[in-house]
Amino acid sequence: MFYPIGLSTVCGTSNYVHMVLQRSQIAPGERITLPSSRVSLSINNPQDLTKKCYAWTGTVTWNSDVPSWSVTLDATCSETGKSSIKLVGTFSGDQ
């Protein structure tokens, strides 16, 4: 399941966040420790390629499924020199 958890714009800079949960391998309410093959998480900033990340430590909690999905992230980029990149908070939407 792909959850488009957000596009944020600050001072003309866009950050694209992409997360995929392997729904056949986890259940709502489950907390997953990163890295995990059951979760794919990335952030990309087309204006500043130093602010992209594809490897994470931390946790993802799948709070609820569609139609009103919700996930909570507490993730820190684990790529060398990028520990200042963090995704923290609860993201939700209706589908």
Image (spheres, rainbow, N blue to C red):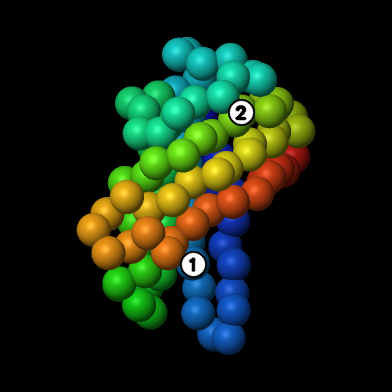
Instruction: Using the rendered image of the protein, determine whether residue 44 is visible from the camera's viewpoint.
Output: no
Residue 80 horizontal side relative to residue 20, left or right: left
The residue that appears at 42% across and 64% down in the rendered structure is: 84
Instruction: Using the rendered image of the protein, determine whether residue 59 is visible from the camera's viewpoint.
Output: yes
Counting from the top left corner in percent of width and height, residue 42 is at 39, 50
Which image quadrant for residue 12? bottom right
- Report the disc number at residue 62: 2
Which image quadrant for residue 64? top right
Instruction: Tell me the amino acid under the disc marked 1.
Output: Asn
Number of numbered tags placed on the structure image: 2
The residue that appears at 37% across and 59% down in the rendered structure is: 83
Residue 33 horizontal side relative to residue 12, left or right: left
Counting from the top left corner in percent of width and height, residue 71 is at 63, 36
In the displayed structure, 30 sits above or below 52; it is above
Whichever of callouts 2 and 1 sits on the residue coming sooner in the sequence is 1
Counting from the top left corner in percent of width and height, residue 18 is at 46, 49
Instruction: Tell me the amino acid under the disc marked 2.
Output: Trp
Residue 75 horizontal side relative to residue 77, left or right: right
Q: What residue sits right under mark 1 in the picture? A: 15
| Number of residues whose C-alpha sits closer than 10 Å to that of mark 2, classed few (under 14), some (14–19) or many (20 or more) | many
Q: Which of these two is toward me, 65 or 79?
A: 79
* Image quadrant in which the C terminus is located: top right
The residue that appears at 63% across and 39% down in the rendered structure is: 72
Alpha carbon separation for disc pair 2 and 1: 22 Å
Counting from the top left corner in percent of width and height, residue 66 is at 69, 28
In the displayed structure, 70 sits above or below 12; it is above
| Number of residues whose C-alpha sits closer than 10 Å to that of mark 1, classed few (under 14), some (14–19) or many (20 or more) | some
Q: Secondary structure at mark 2?
A: strand
Residue situated furthest bottom in the rendering: 11
- Report the disc number at residue 48: none
Q: Secondary structure at mark 1?
A: strand
